[in-house]
Image (cartoon, rainbow, N blue to C red):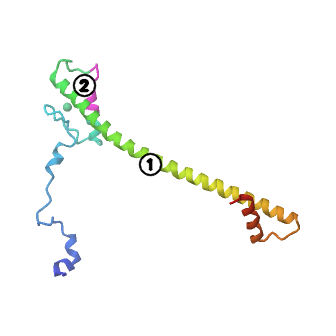
Amino acid sequence: MATSKLADPSDASLGHTKGGNPHKRPLSDQKEGTCPVKSCRHSFRHRPNPQQAIWQHLAYYLNPMCAESPASPFRAAHIEMHEKMKAESASKRLSASEQKERQKESKKKWVEKNKEKRALSLKKSNIRKKAKRELNRKGGTATEAAIEELVGKWLGP
Ligand SMILES: [Zn+2]
């Protein structure tokens, strides 16, 4: 049943949530764009690509040129986080590459099948040409039926 509220399309243009509350910033978003190391939490949200900036930030601590002492727990935490994130992204990449592999496989099959089809139709058309020539040479009329018959004979059962 259509209530008058649902029937009025102008309702959709109102900037309210379903509950009538104003939109609020999702809390989970707060972690995004900041260094995942708890003791750091350096923000990269102002950067055009915060995720990439975090990677660079973490990778900095792997660099022997890093100003922090190698014994620094702060540095160690960043190196550890880098390892962890790398492992996570590697496992994500794996499933993505697996998907790609599967796509490649099915495309290969498709190409294979098409090649066969094309080869077959090429073979057939060559045989048809040959049959036409043969029929013409014999002084007969190369009708469609006559060609088909000859082709069928050549191709066998
Ligand atoms: Zn950090």
Q: In the rendered image, which residue does mark 1 sit on?
A: 103
Choose between 2 and 40: the one closer to the eye: 2
Q: Of helix, strand and loop, which one carries label 1?
A: helix
Q: Of helix, strand and loop, which one carries label 2?
A: loop
Choose between 1 and 31: the one closer to the eye: 1
What residue sits 43% from the left and 44% below the top?
Answer: 101
Task: Give the amino acid type for the residue marked by disc 1 in the picture.
Answer: Gln
Q: Which residues are magenta?
A: 55-65
Residue 20 placement, left or right of 127: left
Quadrant of residue 77 in the image? top left
Query: Which x, y percent locates residue 24?
Result: 13, 56
Q: In the rendered image, which residue does mark 2 sit on?
A: 61
Can residue 60 be found in the magenta stretch?
yes
Number of residue marks: 2
Q: Which quadrant of the figure contains the C terminus?
A: bottom right
What residue sits 80% from the left and 64% below the top?
Answer: 132
Tag 1 near tag 2, CB within 8 Å: no
Q: Which quadrant of the figure contains the N terminus?
A: bottom left
Can residue 19 be found in the magenta stretch?
no
